[in-house]
Image: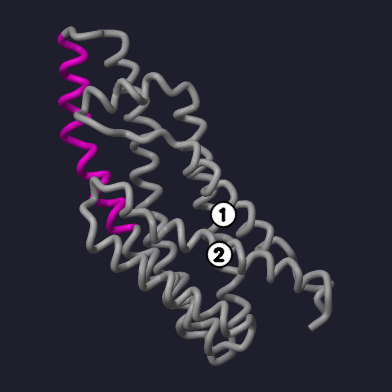
Amino acid sequence: MSGASRPSFYGLALLAGTLLLAAAGLWHPVLEGDGAAQLGRIAATPAWRTIHLALLLGIALVVAGLSGVAGRHAAGPGEQPARASLVLAVLGYGALALNVAFMTGAGTALAAAYARSDTGLTATQAVFVFDMLHPFGLVVQRFGAVVVGLSTYALGWAVVTGGVFPRWLGWVGVVAGGLGVLGALAWNENARQVLAGVALATVWQAALAVLMLRETRSPR
């Protein structure tokens, strides 16, 4: 099949998704301190919802793009690990999206209630609800980071064995995925570093997207 006849949707989706995740991640404010301090920081960030909606869209685009990468390994030696990586990607990014959705909706509403009420009873209730629910979201996020690392490892191995993309890029994915799993297991879910593996996976996926797009413009 010539490069011109290959659809570029998957490469474009993967590249756009990784860029959205990277941009929104860099734009995301750092939440520190107790629940009251974090709600105050959220309330003081006008682009809070925009940032998290961009993260949700980026996650959807990345998963769509990864389905194309897995499809490129169909009926080849890398088919099984590519298929496993796609299942893991859906699970891992779905978990990350669950926490992002909580921070988009409930986080925004609770921060608004806290800001309107100053130190009154409603503010106290908002902080209480946030303190009870946010730890759940962080644990789900940590789980998602572990699974995304496993997905990256599996897809890296598919690239190594599949012969579709350069083997060196596959080994980079294997290393990035392994580091992502170890980091998410080692750090507490409250640590910002727990998402370092997801950041590594995002950079690696961007490289895959560029190669996919180059394939659509030149014959193999």
Q: Main secondary structure of the magenta part?
A: helix
Q: Amino acid at mark 1?
A: Thr
Q: Mark 1 and mark 2 in contact (Cβ < 8 Å)?
A: yes
Going from the N terminus, do you reach mark 2 or mark 1 first?
1
Estimate the x, y position of residue 197 in percent, counting from the top left. Answer: 39, 61
Estimate the x, y position of residue 66 in percent, counting from the top left. Answer: 55, 66
Q: Amino acid at mark 2?
A: Gln
Q: Which residues are magenta?
A: 121-144
Closer to the camera in the image, 38 or 129: 38
Local crowd size for mark 1, using a 10 Å CA cut-off: few (<14), some (14–19), many (≥20): many
Q: Secondary structure at mark 2?
A: helix
Local crowd size for mark 2, using a 10 Å CA cut-off: few (<14), some (14–19), many (≥20): many
The answer to whether 150 is drawn above or below residue 141 in the figure is below
User: Quadrant location of residue 75?
Assistant: bottom right
Residue visible at 48% across and 74% down?
173
Estimate the x, y position of residue 175 in percent, counting from the top left. Answer: 42, 75
Figure disc tally: 2
Dot 2 corresponds to which residue? 205
**Distance Cα–Cα, label 2 vs label 1:** 7 Å
The answer to whether 44 is drawn above or below residue 157 in the figure is above
Residue visible at 79% across and 83% down?
220
Q: Which mark is residue 18?
A: 1
Residue visible at 21% across and 28% down?
35
Quadrant (top left/top right/bottom left/bottom right) for the N terminus? bottom right
Decide whether residue 99 is among the magenta residues.
Answer: no
- Left or right of 151: which side holds 123? left
**What colouring does the structure picture have?**
one colour
Estimate the x, y position of residue 17 in percent, counting from the top left. Answer: 58, 52
The answer to whether 52 is drawn above or below residue 43 in the figure is below
Residue visible at 22% across and 21% down?
126
